Image: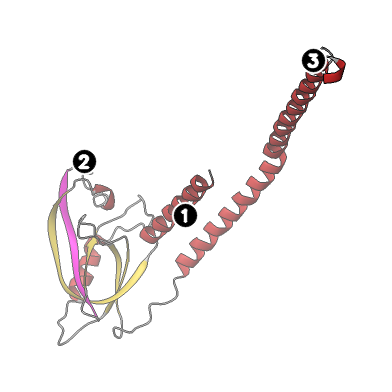
Amino acid sequence: MVYVKWVFWVVFWLFWAAFFHYTLPQTDIARVTDTYEKRIDFGENSIFWASPDVGNDGTLANRDVFFIQTVRANGSTMVYRNEDTGWSWPPYFKFDTSNLQAEAADQKSTADAPKWVAIKHYGWRNEFLSIFPNAVGVSPVSGPDAPKGVPWVNIIILVLFGLVVLGAWRLWRRFRAKRIDPVVDSIESGFDAAGDAVNDGRGRMRRWLDTWKPKHKR
């Protein structure tokens, strides 16, 4: 039973860690090497793609998606999709996909004359599942070591989440102390009383049976 409880809490906190890691904004410093548009047929990974641009048909099985190719200072590559989030989840309220694509295209550069940009995004990159993080902002920076700034949004959201969890935990403790623990104690007391009664009954039965034995065997 203890193992089941630990497994439950481990899965619970892993879920929330993955949720926040996917949803909260992150910033990468890189240079844009290319921007392009590609027709995507959505399959089992459709949950990791945003909804169509605001005003477009949302029932299509495929659509054109903008992409931004980048290279980081260490030489590793990263490809971002560029999709509107609109009014859906996560709540970035992004409606400027075409403008962002134009800004990214204007920042294209080569290794000999690099232009470094800070790419704000959310999501994961997974080659096996064809998952791409969604870029929500592109801004020029001084170089590959430019500061990314303090992630105030992430800090505020995580602090608020911690306060909600703490409040829920305290409410649960109070509810358990007032409602559940007395019932459990009552049930345990009933079992103890029943056990004492059974033991007392067995003792009386044994004493009554002993009266049938010869006096020298009692």
**Is residue 105 shown above or below 200?**
below
Q: Residue tagged by mark 2?
A: 59
**Is residue 207 shown above or below 112?**
above
Q: Amino acid at mark 1?
A: Trp
**Is residue 49 shown above or below 182?**
below
Q: Position of residue 66 (x, y in %)?
A: 18, 60
Q: Nearer the viewer, mark 1 or mark 3?
A: 3
Residue positioned 30% across, 85% down in the render: 142
Residue positioned 31% across, 54% down in the render: 85
Q: Residue tagged by mark 1?
A: 13
Q: Position of residue 150 (x, y in %)?
A: 45, 75
- Element class at badge 1: helix
Q: Amino acid at mark 3?
A: Leu
> Which label belongs to residue 209?
3
Neighbours of disc 2 within 10 Å: few (<14), some (14-19), many (20+): few
Name which of mark 1 and mark 2 comes first in the sequence. 1
| Highlighted range, magenta | 61-73
From the viewer's side, name the closer residue of 10 and 40. 10
Q: Nearer the viewer, mark 2 or mark 3?
A: 3
Residue positioned 18% across, 63% down in the render: 67
Type of secondary structure dominating the magenta stretch = strand
Residue found farthest to the front: 216
Residue found farthest to the right: 215
Q: Position of residue 146 (x, y in %)?
A: 34, 83
Question: Does the rendering let one see residue 13?
Answer: yes
